[in-house]
Amino acid sequence: MLLRTLLALAVLFVAPVVPANAAPGCSGYVALTYDDGPTTGYTRQLLDALRAVRARATFFDIGSQVERHPDLVRATARARMWLGNHSWSHPRLTTLTPEELTSEMARTQDAIRRATGRTPKLFRPPYGDTNAAVAAEAGRQGMDHVLWSVDTRDWSGPPTDAIVRSALTAKAGGVVLMHDGYQTTVDAVPLIVRGLRAKGLCPGRIVDGKAVAP
């Protein structure tokens, strides 16, 4: 009797806490995010790769790119991905005037809304360059300010396996930073998703800066 009691207590202390709304096989969620799109060479490839492994991700798009390629933003929305605002021209936001800061976010909100009918609820500052004024302006425009917990540095030219290794360091609730614009990043999609699922983690959406169930 005492042995059974001790074993039950041990399970309570070492077993992972599973979210109440977790899907079968998911002990937690990780958000896959892609910045700097849409791009003519890679957005559709990313969408195809994600759909092939039944995964959803968040795309933080640049407003000027959205204006050039509204069809790609619509394709992203149709694929049931989440859309986020990544500024109009990808500047260092902390160097801007208040008026410029407002415009960078608002123009991108308008562009995505015109293209898809959706108004983004998430904002990611380019380069992670942020301060209290940037976060406050995002909030004023109805967006949560989102950074990341894992940076794959895919923009710096690592091979696919290095991107995968970085992404798989994410813990439950984590947010993985990647970019729309690299073949290595596209090729990493199935390996990342399979690797996460092997650890009991599934792709999720972002709420309050962390990944939760879709």
Image: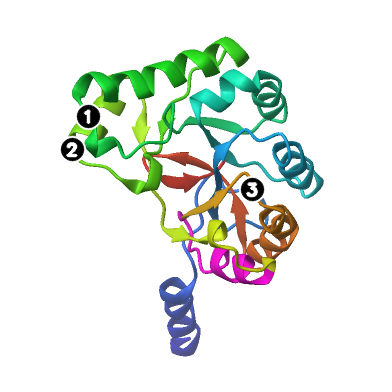
Local packing at callout 1 (Cα closer than 10 Å; few below 14, some 14-19, many 20+) is: some
Residue 160 position within the rendered picture, expressed as x and y whole percent measured from the top left: 68, 66
Marking on residue 23? 3
Q: Residue at x 77, y 43 (%)?
A: 45
Horizontal arrangement in the rendering, residue 163 relative to residue 98 (left or right): right
Q: Secondary structure at mark 3?
A: loop
Residue type, numbered disc 1: Ala
The answer to the question of whether label 2 and label 1 lie on touching residues, with beta carbons closer than 8 A, is yes
Marking on residue 132? 2
Residue stretch in magenta: 161-174
Local packing at callout 2 (Cα closer than 10 Å; few below 14, some 14-19, many 20+) is: few
Separation (CA) of disc 2 from disc 3: 36 Å
Q: Check disc 1 and report the residue beneath it.
A: 136
Q: Residue at x 21, y 41 (%)?
A: 131
Residue 204 figure quarter: top right
Residue 7 seen from this side: yes
Separation (CA) of disc 1 from disc 3: 34 Å
Separation (CA) of disc 2 from disc 1: 6 Å
Q: Secondary structure at mark 2?
A: helix
Residue type, numbered disc 2: Ala
**Comes first in the chain, label 1 or label 3:** 3
Residue type, numbered disc 3: Ala
Given residues 70 and 156, the one toward you in this image is 156
Residue 164 position within the rendered picture, expressed as x and y whole percent measured from the top left: 63, 66
Quarter of the image for the C terminus: give it.
top right
